[in-house]
Amino acid sequence: MKIMVVGGGGREHAIIKKLKENKDVTEIYALPGNGGIAKDATCVDIGAKDIEKIVEFAVSNGIDYAVVAPDDPLVLGAVDALEKKGIPCFGPRANAAIIEGSKVFSKNLMKKYGIPTAAYEVFDDMDAALAYLESAPIPTVIKADGLALGKGVIIAMTRDEARDAVHSMMKDKVFGASGDHIVIEEFLSGPEVSVLSFTDGKTIMPMVSSMDHKRAGDNDTGLNTGGMGTVAPNPYYTPEIAERCMQEIFLPTVAAMNAEGRTFKGCLYFGLMLTENGPKVIEYNCRFGDPETQVVLPLLESDLLTIMQATTNGTLADCPVEFAEGNACCVIMASKGYPTHYEKGFAMTIPGEIANNVYVAGAAIKDGTLVTNGGRVLGATAVADTLENAIDSAYAMVKQIHFENAYYRNDIGQRALCAKEK
Ligand code: AMP
Ligand code: GLY
């Protein structure tokens, strides 16, 4: 089978490595992939948002199955366009990807179907938003409507910060048209859990839970990033909470999307907060998380391609989705300065013995050498019997990987360890 994976980050590298375990897979193409992915797939210089070229490539190369991993092409309708040409795909159609593409859509969906989430108001007029803020409880959370590369969320600790956020989104348009509509929502607190799930629109199979570390600095300080590391499973996510999430959040979300005529097939990501009043949805994503995938897929014991095809064919109920008992830890190595300004182009060395556990996110090949080419450069993942051992092994790998200006957090997994000790 010839497989095409759209995307080019650490998440896609993890997906590709797992797909390669299936013996029927003869060829994997990554569009565009990256210099590190090139060891495991044939990289093709077509951008993940270039739907027309993606479809053209798939048709002319006889692709048997396509995996569309990032949010942008999903929201832009890559799956719809590929399906029109008869190419089976993993991922939701555009009318379902809107669950991530529009915060206004997802908040209204949750309200309509009674799915627990932070209380909120939607505004398309700046004066109305500012008037509302005069008496809104502080802290408050302000979110731009559309995809904003994960940066469209501002937690305002004071009323002035809240006003500034509204101005920058609605007047200065720092997130472009995403700021035409904003959501102002209740500030929630509690441990956060990421739950990725497979769904074919009828059955939903949650994967092992995970915990992201979004801030750039140790002890959760500094700017928000795409994610600096992950562990799985998430110790806060007990079997009781999992059952409650299934009944109150996961099944109702699948049913709500069906009722709206927007059946969701693919990976539905639940960003949850475990509040004093029960689990609530912070965000939905229409795709695998990054770097959650880099700890979740290494624990998957069942065959990924078989599961993906079952979500496409609507046969997920009959498909085994089994995870190993152990723990996984992924430490992201980034370029110093990420998520703002950083330099690229430094030669990287990854010893061969550990290369199989390294998922490359931002690298290119220059004159035959692997060089850094992004903010997040790679993730090193270890799987072990205990969380302590997984953390130790992941950091032992990080110490063996070298490139100039490398930066990583030193405390990935510590929050989870503390939770376990309680
Ligand atoms: P999002 O891009 O929606 O995942 O938001 C980024 C981060 O902002 C989340 O991971 C949370 O840590 C935080 N956040 C989002 N919404 C809320 C909320 N209503 N209350 C508290 N924190 C939030
Ligand atoms: N790691 C968070 C995300 O993928 O959205």
Image (cartoon, rainbow, N blue to C red):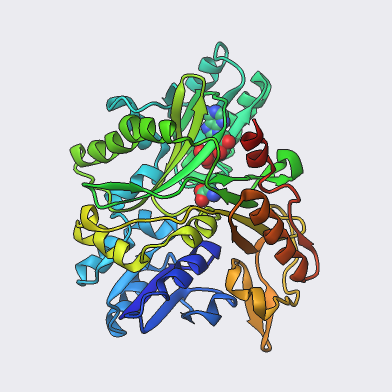
Q: What residue sits 61% from the left and 30% below the top?
A: 155
Image coordinates for residue 38, horizontal then vertical, percent: 54, 80
Quadrant of the snapshot with the N terminus: bottom left
In this image, 267 relative to 318: left or right? right
Q: Nearer the viewer, residue 332 or 352?
A: 352
The location of residue 331, given as percent across then percent down, is 66, 57
- Please name whichever residue, 397 or 137, is drawn nearer the observer in this view of the structure: 397
Q: Which quadrant is the C terminus positioned in? A: top right
Q: Is 118 situated left or right of 113 in this image?
A: right
Q: What count of labels does the image hold?
A: 0
Residue 174 rendering spot, x and y as whole percentages: 58, 43
Residue 187: image x %, image y %?
A: 55, 23
* Residue at x 71% of width, y 66% of height: 397
- Residue 170 seen: no
Residue 306 in sight in this render: yes
Q: Residue furthest top?
A: 135
Viewer-proximal residue, 101 or 361? Answer: 361
Image height of 389 relative to 103, above or below: below
Q: Identify the residue shown where x is 57% and y is 27%.
A: 190
Which residue ends up furthest to the right in the rendered image? 404
Q: Which residue is drawn at 47% across and 32% down?
A: 182
Query: Quadrant location of residue 393?
Result: bottom right
Q: Determine the image quadrant of residue 249.
A: top left
Q: Is residue 381 above or below residue 254?
A: below
> Quarter containing ligand 1?
top right
